[in-house]
Image (cartoon, rainbow, N blue to C red):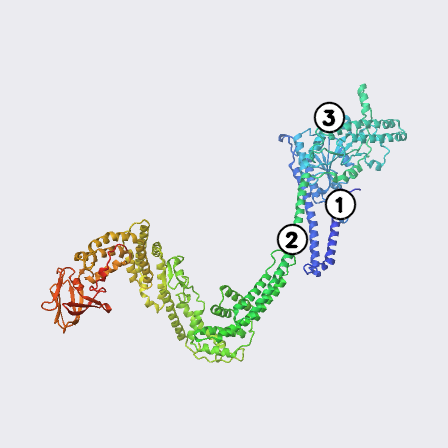
Amino acid sequence: MNQPAREPGALRPLLQTAGVLAAGALIWFVGPLVAVAGRVPLASEAARAWALAALLALSLGSMAAHSLRARRRNRQLLDGLVAGADADTQPGTPETVQAPTPEVELLGRRFQEAVAQLKRARIGRRRGLAAWARPYVYELPWYVIIGAPGAGKTTALVNSGLEFPLADQPGAGQALRGVGGTRNCDWWFTDQAVLIDTAGRYTTQDSHQAADRAAWLGVLDLLKRYRPRRPVNGVLLTVSVADLLGASPQARQAHARALRERIAELQRHLGIRFPVYVLVTKTDLLAGFMEFFADLDKDERAQVWGFTLPAEGGPADPLPLMSSELAALEKRLNEHLLERLHAEADRDRRAALFAFPQQWRLLHELLLELLQAAFGPASEAASAPRDAATAPPLLRGVYFTSATQEGTPIDRALGGIARTLGLSGRLLLPARPSGKSFFVTRLLRDVVFAEAGLAGLNLRWMRRRALAQLALGGLSVVAAAAVLALGWRAYADNHAYLADAARQLPALRHQAQAARASAPTDLVALMPVLDGAERFARQTATGAAGPSLGLDQRELLSAAADDAYARLLHEAFLPRVAARLEARLRSGSPEHVELVYEALRAYLMLFAGRNFDAAALRADLDADWDATVPATPAQRAALRRHLQRLLAGGEVGAPEAVDPQLIARARALVAGVPVADRVFRRLQQGDAGAPAFSIASATGPSAPKLFARASGRPLEEGVPGFYTRAVYPQRLRERTREALRQLERERAWVLGTAGARAMPVAAVAPTAPATPSVAEAPAPSLAEAVERLYLAEHARQWESFIGDLRLAATPTLAASAEVAQALARPDSPLAALLRAVAREVAVSPVLAPRHEPLSRFVAGQPAPLDDTLSLLGSAGQQLAVIDDAVRRRTLPPPGPALKNLAAAAQQAPEPVNALLGPLAAAGGAQALAALHEPLSRQLSAEVGAACSRSLDNRYPFARGAAQEVSREDFVRFFGAGGMIDEFVQRRLVPYGADATPAAFQRARQVRDAFFTDGGRRFGVQLELRLLELDPALSEFVIDIDGQAHRFRREARAPQRLRWPASEDAPGRVTLRTGASGGYGFDGPWALLRLFDRVRIEPGAGGRVELIFDVEGRKARFEARSATALNPVLRSELESFPCPRRL
């Protein structure tokens, strides 16, 4: 007995088991022979056992997944049937739907119970291992049986000889009656296939077309959804002989069209082309059928009677082929007719036998007519492109069956004669049921079910599957290519990596040789080889950039490189560290005793593991390297990194023997320095734990634009945090106590004092301290001494910082205005800096008295500082106004802001005067420079022209001139409040600058020489002392406005001359040497005209000698003036230019 098309699935467990056994054998026996990158992953039995377990788990998982997937699809398909049953649809309108009867309810329950059993059941006859792979319902071939009502579909299935698994259920029978939406279907679940016996009206759809079509398409949708690859395996088209012989030509044509439409509808809806098997049922109704085949035994009745057409390559119109096949069947009948006639004794039966071929011919013609209408070529061109949905039906064969013999045989020939003669009534007797079936049993098993795979596949589903398979194949190819590419890349990367490592080795050897030739204390010379070894070890420790596939050698090389780096640190770096410590100990001095102490402590740590402290040792060495090693910041960072790696493993041990004499000498040196000095220096070198005080930290981000330092040092530098109020006094005293305690703890093993435990190095003898130890000196006195040292250095640091404060240079007038305004704003950086400085110095008992003026200056509400800032703001505004006026080429209004700022700066305490004084001076000078042209024009208009008219070419400015400058004009120009002084005070002094042109300077000297009382009063004062008098003269008299000044040889005391004698005096000056000798001058410049007759000899220290010659008799005097310019000397007057430009 043949098995269904899914039968190859029976081999699935066997093949899968065989594959697992073969793969397991390869893993167990061949696995140890396979090496990857020099390693054998499956060398151990444990590894192979795990691999076999993984293979078995993968295989069982695959089988379980397949079973679960099949069971899920089976359940989903059957759930769809139940859901359709639950819909309980009835044809007709809602008004015509009747309440379900008890019989319908019973059918519904049975349908659901049967479906529930099918969800769990496997169907088939497989035994043994193949029984486990028996298919679920959805995996069996599915066939649709369609035909007109009463065509004998159900009868043919019942007599087909198939097994029905649900027949054991009480009341189930062979077929499972559908209910609800499947009410009009019988579901035949056999051991070979699932057959849907549709109601006859599904074919004709002549009762309720919409309801019939909806129910029909619902069943097809279920199949298409859960059997997407091949929804159905074929169609059994049943045609009853009674319908063929008894129907009118019009009815047969309508029936053929209905069959054609149903088949086309199936193809369109399912999207596949499937074989159609035409079953001509009830052939026993042909007159003479039972008599003709009465001699057949059971096996002969089980054979197939019909013909099978070609599956592929057949003609487009199968009618000629079918006609020839039917003729061949008729020929067989005729060949067998004579034998049957001889064998039959009954005359009536022989008559029926003889007529049977003629009855067959009549059926032959009617059947051809029906098949031509149902399967013949369509009217469109046969060459038109078609797909599975529109291709002509695949008529696979025509088969004749007889399940049971019921009803009256039809004799179409006699019937026609009877109708012609007008006879009525039956011409033939009804056939008696024989209980035999003809040509049914082997038809389904041997022909139909054997061709379950003949149906075409769902092209849409196949395209999706093909695309999926193509994508999966592409991914597999890509994955394989990726694996190959990764393998090649891993190999290339590893090869390049090893080559690169090999290229670095010669450089490392060269660097090592160069380091050996350097001084034993030179750490910088060792840096290249240390950096190279560290870099090499770090590079080798870096994993591959991508998957290495077991080819990466970095791990092995990394371990070797790291080991080499560690040996280099111990064998090369450590000896140089020890040598530097010894060098420090040899070169130590009392001025750097703390450095000696730290070097001694570090040196002893290397040799005395009991006192090893990696953090302390690292701190001591870092401090030494920062102070003494000439290295870049990058090199210093590398040194610290190498040292940290060296000390990471704990005690390192010195590579050389200890030097006892060196230790003793260092101990003596340290012990000779007072403890307080050592503690203070240690505190200095330690971490202050507080930020440094700087201009930048006190004033914020605007500091670079506003401030500078006279020394040029960065604004970020300042007073170390150790000397700020964050440390003093509380933290300083705490750290002092801690330092004292630490010195006491270290005294025993660092200084080797008496009573201390013996050092591990026996050759090192204790050294008695030259000064009291920490334990012997009273702690308060030591702490106070440390604080005194601190305060002295604190004061030095702050005085240096305060004296270094300056404002930023302002090269332009606009820059000066901007700085002044920025310093004067409400959040003034200057105020912040000054107040911060005042707070810092206030904590020091040394600095607080010195800078008390500054503390008062910034204290209070409002503080004097606020007034100064207000003046600073006004000065900034004035400078801005001047700058704007210069741009507009106008003269700004004068103002006292700059002058007031300069005066306030002079009165302010340090460092305010040093900050604001230069700003006021620079701003004034820049203002004058910017206003040079307009001021020059104004000077020329207001002073220069009048000066030229009144002074040029007049005596005393022009010696020998006949015209004299009137005293009033002289006072108007040179006196206090005069034209020149008024211009200076109104136009120049507001800018904080004196008269810079030479004319103004000489005008000031003239005023000082010829005016008294601060320039408000015209007059000259001279002090004359007689040095020598001609022997012929008894006296020498100078008379000024009636006031006679007599000089005698015996009275040589200096005499003060005042000219003019009074404001209203005429100014006459007379010189007399006796009763008749002498001469005199009148006028406003009589005194100067007198001096014109005198020989003048300038002397040192502003002293001038006057030599009078009166009629050949001489008198020599010494003239002194209280002013820088002696009025006797006329050079300043004669060279005085009238001011026209600044």
Which residue is nearer to you in this view: 390 or 45?
390
**SS of the residue at dot 2?**
helix
**Would you identify the image quadrant in which residue 556 lies?**
bottom right
Q: Position of residue 249 (x, y in %)?
A: 75, 24
Q: Quadrant of the N terminus?
A: top right
| Residue of label 2 | 485
Residue extending furthest toward the front: 1112
**Residue occupied by mark 1:** 8
Element type at marker 3? Answer: helix
Q: Quadrant of the C terminus?
A: bottom left
Rendered position, 464 above or below 569: above
The answer to which of 760 and 685 lies nearer the viewer is 685
Q: Amino acid at mark 3?
A: Ala
For marks 3 and 1, give the CA distance. 45 Å
Q: For residue 548, say whether it is visible.
A: no
* Residue 987 x, y percent position in the rendering: 26, 54
Three-letter amino acid code at the position of disc 2: Ala
Three-letter residue code for mark 1: Pro
- 10 Å crowding of disc 2: few (<14), some (14-19), many (20+): few
User: Pointer 3: what residue?
Assistant: 251
